[in-house]
Amino acid sequence: MRIIIGKILGDTLRLTLFVIAFGLASAQADASLSAAIANGLEGQDVVSGVPARFSILGEKNPTVVVFLSAHCPCSESHEPVLKKLATEFTDVRFVGVHSNADEEVQEATEHFKKSQLPFPVIRDAGAKWADAFGALKTPHVFVVSPSGDVLFKGGVDDSHVAAEAKKHFLRAALTDVREGRKPTVTEARSLGCTIKR
């Protein structure tokens, strides 16, 4: 009986410690994201190579932050979708973020120059924004309100290949925001290549 009680108490203590540690980690992640949103994205424009700063907090319109890759097939297949959304939702600001440490600067420059996205792509040295946003894959999208609230995070849609998608998460979220509603779906699984830190 003592052994059983001791085991139950031990398991309870481990679970309590796990919950506390998880809560602290979540609070730290929230603080990092809040700081990244407040400070904006600052770095080098991948295409032009010139310093760039992209503010988020306090802007008139929501911002779509999308993490992209120069050699991920999933990321590349969603570039036409992102182009179309950026031209349709002109009341929303788009910015791309390139965080992959395993992609050479020249490779990224050539790729994004060729893809001709209608929004800037900023180099994320040290993956500090990827870490702050909790971005895991490419493409990974975050819709942020002017007040700094993350309205949606996840995949652009439900497929590795954009043309095969059945659910269009980003489009639905942007439509909801445009019509004055909170997105019906606030989080969706992101698909694609893992961001290499």
Image: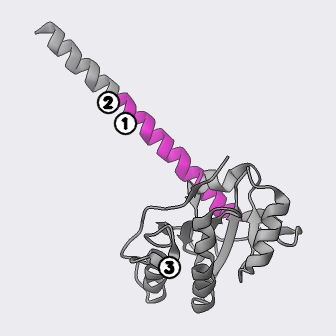
Residue of label 3? 163
**Disc on the earlier residue, 3 or 1:** 1
Could you tell me how many numbered marks the image carries? Answer: 3
* Element assignment for label 2: helix
Q: Can residue 73 be seen from the camera position used here?
A: yes
Residue 43, position as x, y percentages in the image = 80, 62
Query: The residue under label 3 is which amino acid type?
Result: Ala
Distance CA(mark 3)–CA(mark 1): 41 Å
Mark 3 and mark 2 lie on one chain; the one further toward the N terminus is 2
- Is residue 135 visible from the viewing direction of this image? no
Q: Is residue 177 magenta?
A: no
162 or 47, nearer to the observer: 162
Q: Which residue is mark 2?
A: 15
Is residue 3 or residue 85 the one in the foreground? 85
In the rendered image, residue 11, in percent from the top left (x then y), is placed at: 27, 23
- Mark 2–mark 1 Cα distance, whole angstroms, equals 6 Å
What whole-number distance in Å separates the C-alpha atoms at marks 3 and 2? 44 Å
* Residue in view at x 44 percent, y 89 percent: 179
SS for callout 3: helix
For discs 3 and 2, the disc positioned in front in the rendered view: 3
Q: Mark 1 and mark 2 in contact (Cβ < 8 Å)?
A: yes
Give me the residue at 66% from left, 49% from top: 196
Q: Position of residue 163 (x, y in %)?
A: 50, 79
Residue 91 lies, in percent from the top left, at 60, 89
The quadrant where residue 129 appears:
bottom right
Say whether marks 3 and 2 touch (CB < 8 Å). no
> Where does label 1 land, which residue?
19
Left or right: where 174 falls relative to 132: left
In magenta, the rendered stretch is 15-40
In the rendered structure, which amino acid carries the disc numbered 1? Answer: Val
Amino acid carrying label 2: it is Leu
